[in-house]
Image (cartoon, coloured by chain):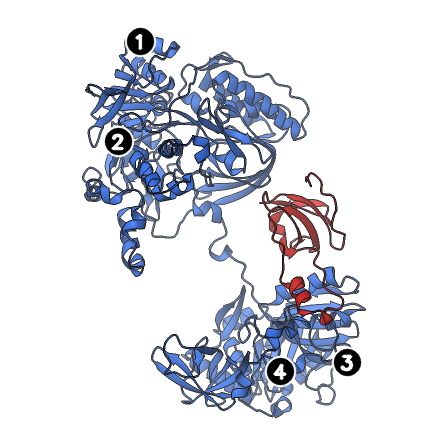
């Protein structure tokens, strides 16, 4: 079972308390009704599914219930870092080579 | 007497403590402290089972958890018949009853052994070749027959009466393995004061000190030192010592699963004791001290009972005081087997000969064996074992060929060397590395905060192992935050030397032979099978494994993996590391379902949710149905009514007078805040800004893709307060959906969401007399149609308690939903029920509710929709705010496919024969005479007998359905084709007049 650090509770808690909520940093357009089919397809259907570093959303379901963002390595399952929803995508990752 | 082969003065068990036991009905005596294996051997019993595929007689190979052969069924009573118990692990208790497995009619005469004669049929990959065709025969013929013929034990056929417990634990240093290395590591860590857990799968700690008679530590016998060290550790408050505890799985971030066998070794376990305890341990550092496992020699008939690992024979002698034979032979490719010969010889057992594959080895053990007068043959191989139910001879030949010599023996002790036990390291996702010099895989690159010490790390010799373990234990403690250690390192005064051995088939079982030289005993895989797999095109070791099933049995190839790999590599002409090792998977040894499930079974398997009104419904004799975790009253049968009669009566009763329905399970969410209306605008398709406080609206929620996600009636209690209802099953995901948007997409909105499902009990009162029933109990609310019209909500009191009174209808009748605090739910229900009796009201359940709403064409999300239905498909386009510029799903529902012609639309269906009720899920076609497979144009989503309509009614999703009104379609069923007419969705009171009736 993974340990996940909730950036709101500022504690590492067991995976059981959390739910994954898909890829992060996919912004919903403020003018979504006016989006082209292509743009909507990219926004709604296309996901990166990388081997390696992924930016994803988690929810501390059985804790503070907040959604937050996490950086995880899909190969090792290791969490690189977590940060609050709305914060920018980190440009530097601790312990990860470019 | 506890067995003829018990040697007085040998071993550590007290002869005074006799334990009686039975095996296949025969009664024997053993000693407390024995394993079932040692007790059987003390009585001269080697034949304990039949093999999986060929039904060959099998004996006891090992003295530990790696045992592939000696699997037995332990029978405590009718419900406690545990199969596949390793006799080498099962501790003896007085009265233990064990049976052999996989034989019929008896162990010594087994009809299935004909498979051994027919073995060419059963060679590698035979499952894939023989039972290919026809496909249908798999289910009906092949699989059941194979299971019957080639099973291991028999599952118990009654519910497990034992209970199991589960614990979470945290520690700084977790030490897995309680041999000399593990104990040294635990001492070093414990002395710093950090929290330590030390676990070992055996009843007594000591590991190989159980048999290493030459070991001396801190001036005492090695095993005695181990017991003293464990006593010291157990007395420390920062240490937990867990015997009989197997670490079976090493998971992410130093999370380790262990199973403690709490009471399987007890004669009469008290009911307060669990059978097993699951430990889920999170450790800052893990020290792996899992030791090494001895390999057998691969030669013809190496599976005969009496052929066993040399180290095991030593354990049986030095720990249990049991000689495994009276005239033993030794076959080895390394030094360690000599020690077995020496110990047995000194105990008075005749050692017929030592056969050593090596040409001219030298060393102290060889000198000692020679000095004891044991015959030693270098450069020779055992090419076959004689005997059937028990080994009777070994045939020796120079390893490069030459004259054979057959030597009578009653046991053969073999050792091809020791394999570091890297299972847990590998499970931790560490990468093993092949040491070319010692020909073994050892821990290479670590993936987690752990360290391997001693034999599992490829460290040879007791002294080096203890030094390494002590240093690593201290470092692990320091890394986990400890201060410096205070203790003293154990000093190894004497130890035995270990040396490398050989891998693969021995001479006489080479590529030019077809002998049965077993690599994997439990799955009956021979050296020939592995070569055949390579010849038939398997290149990767993972393919060889699956084709031959080598290493796939319950022992997970503990003794066989390296031999199998070496033979495959040799046949491929590649070095071992290029062929690679198969992946080690959890569990290390089999784990019971009981220990994993623990208390989560029966009523504790899943929470059961009951409404406040549940006890009343129970008293009325309601039949309940499960809706998610909820128990809901399904119908209320009276005086012998069946479901059909009860539902008909309830449906008619509601429309004639009135009905009471427990709607408490409806999901309820309160949306509150200055921006509540804005939020509602974004989450639902409908417009909300202009909804007056005190009014309700039917809302539809979409996902971003434009499909219906949920629906429900929403009441606006105040400008900044909405009382939102959801479907019963949808409540949690709707809440999650709302929170997601509020937190991440619309965080600028000042809104709070609160789940109030459990806070409000909901009593639906529906029917022409509904107002007459409610009105006398209500205070502060004007119940007239003018003041409280359809789709409105008021706050006031009922029976003196606060209520949110909704005027709404899911039946098409004049209706109300009375929300009261859950604590008052039953009392208010009973008051309404009493009032209802004056007006002929009936209680109705979920089935009648379904029928009544279907009569009106009201949909149920999740039944009439399936996640691919748009508001327009469902005929709910009117509920989508046309002037809105944004809501979740606004863009998705305009995708080309969602606005295309010919989509499936929700319509009504009437069977031509009104008595025929369609089956929900039935497929619909245009032309029933077309060839199969027919073109299906839709399916039935809801279908009922409607007593109010005097006929059957149905809803269906049909391609282009609204353009087919009046058309005849067909529903082909196994018993014939049913003709239906496409209609509108409203079957009863089409004008809706009864809402105010």
Q: Chain of mark 1?
A: B
For the residues labelled 1 and 2, the Cα–Cα distance comes to: 35 Å
Label 1 or label 3, whichever lies nearer to me, is 1
- Marks 4 and 2 sit apart, C-alpha to C-alpha, by 85 Å
Which disc number belongs to residue B512? 2
Disc 1 + disc 4, Cβ < 8 Å: no
Relative to B56, residue B822 above or below: below
Q: Which residue is mark 4?
A: B809
Q: Position of residue B922 (x, y in %)?
A: 43, 77
**Which quadrant of the structure image shows residue B893?**
bottom right
Whether labels 1 and 3 belong to a single chain: the reply is: yes
Answer with left or right where residue B256 lies relative to residue B337: right
Instruction: Name the subunit of mark 4.
Output: B
Please, is residue B147 above or below residue B85 in the view? below
The one nearer the camera, B580 or B148, is B580
In terms of sequence position, does the residue under pointer 1 or pointer 4 come before the other?
A: 1
| Dot 2: chain letter | B
């Amino acid at each position: 079972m993974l340990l996940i650090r909730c950036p709101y509770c500022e504690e590492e808690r067991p995976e059981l308390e959390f739910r994954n909520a898909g890829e992060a940093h996919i912004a919903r357009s403020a003018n979504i009704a006016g989006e082209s089919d292509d743009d909507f397809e990219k926004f709604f259907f296309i996901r990166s599914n990388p081997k390696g570093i992924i930016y994803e959303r988690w929810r501390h379901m059985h804790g503070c219930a907040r959604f937050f963002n996490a950086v995880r390595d899909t190969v090792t399952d290791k969490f690189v870092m977590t940060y609050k929803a709305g914060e920018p995508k980190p440009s530097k990752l601790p312990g990860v080579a470019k | 007497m506890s067995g003829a082969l018990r040697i007085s003065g040998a071993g550590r068990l007290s002869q005074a403590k006799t334990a009686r036991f039975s095996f296949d009905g025969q009664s024997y005596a053993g000693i407390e402290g024995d394993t079932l294996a040692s007790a059987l051997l003390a009585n001269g019993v080697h034949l304990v089972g039949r093999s999986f595929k060929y039904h060959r007689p099998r004996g006891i190979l090992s003295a530990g958890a790696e045992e592939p052969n000696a699997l037995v069924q332990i029978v405590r009573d009718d419900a406690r018949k545990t199969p596949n118990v390793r006799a080498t692990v099962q501790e003896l208790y007085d009265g233990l009853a064990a049976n052999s497995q996989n034989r019929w009619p008896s162990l010594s005469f087994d009809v299935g052994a004909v498979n051994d004669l027919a073995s060419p049929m059963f060679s590698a990959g035979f499952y894939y070749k023989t039972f290919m065709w026809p496909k249908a025969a798999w289910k009906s013929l092949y699989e059941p027959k194979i299971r019957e013929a080639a099973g291991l034990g028999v599952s118990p056929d009654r519910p497990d009466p034992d209970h199991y417990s589960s614990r979470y634990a945290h520690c700084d240093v977790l030490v897995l393995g309680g041999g000399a290395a593990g104990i040294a590591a635990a001492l070093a860590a414990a002395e710093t004061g950090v929290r330590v857990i030390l676990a070992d799968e055996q009843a007594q700690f000591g590991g190989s000190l159980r048999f290493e008679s030459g070991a001396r530590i801190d001036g005492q016998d090695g095993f005695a030192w181990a017991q003293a060290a464990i006593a010291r550790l157990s007395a420390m408050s920062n240490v937990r010592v867990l015997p009989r505890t197997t670490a079976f799985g090493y998971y992410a971030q130093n999370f380790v699963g262990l199973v403690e066998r709490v009471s399987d070794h007890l004669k009469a376990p008290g009911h307060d004791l669990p059978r097993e305890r699951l430990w889920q341990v999170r450790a800052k550092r893990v020290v792996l001290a899992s030791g090494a496992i001895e390999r057998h020699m691969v030669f013809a008939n190496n599976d005969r009972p009496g052929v066993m690992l040399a180290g095991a024979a030593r354990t049986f002698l030095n720990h249990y005081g049991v000689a495994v034979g009276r005239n033993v032979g030794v076959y080895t490719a390394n030094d360690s087997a000599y020690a077995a010969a020496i110990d047995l010889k000194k105990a008075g057992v005749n050692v017929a000969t030592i056969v050593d594959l090596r040409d001219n080895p030298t060393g102290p053990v060889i000198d000692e064996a020679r000095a004891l007068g044991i015959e030693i043959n270098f450069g020779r191989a055992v090419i076959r074992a004689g005997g059937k139910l028990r080994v009777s001879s070994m045939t020796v030949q120079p390893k490069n060929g030459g004259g054979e010599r057959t030597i009578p023996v009653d046991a053969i002790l073999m050792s091809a060397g020791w394999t570091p036990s890297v299972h847990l390291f590998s499970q931790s996702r560490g990468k093993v590395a092949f040491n070319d010099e010692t020909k073994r895989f050892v821990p290479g690159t670590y993936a987690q905060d752990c360290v391997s010490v001693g034999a599992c790390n490829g460290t040879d010799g007791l002294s080096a192992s203890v030094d390494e373990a002590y240093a690593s234990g201290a470092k692990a403690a320091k890394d986990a935050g400890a201060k410096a250690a205070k203790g003293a390192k154990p000093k190894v005064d004497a130890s035995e030397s270990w040396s490398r051995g050989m891998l693969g088939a021995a001479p006489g079982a080479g590529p030019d032979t077809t002998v049965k030289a077993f690599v994997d005993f439990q799955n009956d895989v021979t050296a020939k099978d592995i070569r055949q797999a390579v010849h038939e095109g398997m290149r990767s070791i993972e393919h060889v494994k699956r084709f031959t099933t080598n290493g796939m049995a319950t022992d997970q190839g503990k003794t066989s993996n390296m031999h199998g790999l070496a033979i495959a590599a040799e046949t491929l002409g590649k070095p071992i590391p290029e062929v690679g090792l198969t992946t080690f998977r959890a569990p290390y040894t089999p784990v019971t379902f009981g220990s994993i499930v623990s208390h989560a079974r029966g009523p504790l398997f899943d929470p059961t949710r009951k409404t406040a009104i549940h006890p009343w419904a129970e008293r009325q004799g309601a039949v309940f149905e499960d809706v998610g975790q909820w128990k809901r009253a399904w119908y209320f049968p009276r005086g012998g009514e069946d479901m059909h009669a009860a539902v008909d009566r309830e449906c008619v009763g509601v429309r004639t007078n009135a009905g009471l329905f427990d709607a408490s399970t409806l999901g309820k969410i309160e949306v509150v805040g200055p921006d509540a209306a804005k939020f509602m605008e974004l989450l639902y398709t409908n417009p909300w800004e202009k909804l007056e406080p005190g009014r309700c609206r039917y809302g539809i929620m979409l996902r971003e893709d434009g499909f219906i996600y949920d629906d429900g009636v929403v009441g606006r209690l105040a400008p900044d307060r909405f009382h939102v209802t959801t479907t019963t099953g949808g409540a949690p995901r709707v809440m999650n959906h709302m929170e997601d948007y509020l937190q991440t997409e619309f965080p600028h909105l000042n809104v709070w969401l609160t789940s109030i499902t459990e806070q409000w009990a909901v009593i639906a009162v529906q029917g022409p007399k509904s107002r007459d029933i409610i009105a006398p109990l209500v205070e502060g609310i004007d119940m007239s149609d003018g003041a409280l019209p359809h789709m409105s909500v008021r706050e006031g009191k009922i029976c003196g308690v606060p209520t949110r009174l909704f005027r709404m209808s899911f039946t098409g009748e004049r209706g109300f939903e009375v929300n009261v605090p859950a604590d008052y739910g039953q009392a208010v229900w009973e008051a309404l029920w009493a009032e209802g009796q004056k007006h002929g009201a009936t209680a109705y359940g979920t089935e009648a509710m379904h029928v009544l709403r279907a009569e009106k064409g009201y949909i149920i999300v999740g039944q009439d929709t399936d996640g691919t239905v748009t508001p327009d498909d469902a005929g709910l386009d009117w509920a989508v705010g046309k002037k809105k510029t944004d809501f979740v799903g606004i863009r998705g529902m305009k995708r080309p496919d969602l606005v295309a012609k010919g989509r499936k639309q929700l319509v009504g269906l009437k069977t031509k024969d009104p008595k025929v009720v369609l089956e929900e899920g039935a497929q619909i076609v245009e032309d029933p005479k077309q060839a199969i497979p027919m073109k299906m144009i839709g399916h039935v989503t809801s279908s009922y007998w409607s007593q109010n309509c005097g006929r059957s009614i149905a809803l269906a999703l049909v391609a282009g359905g609204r353009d087919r009104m009046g058309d005849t379609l067909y529903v082909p069923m196994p018993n014939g084709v049913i003709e239906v007419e496409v209609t509108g969705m409203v079957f009863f009171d089409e004008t809706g007049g009864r809402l105010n009736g």
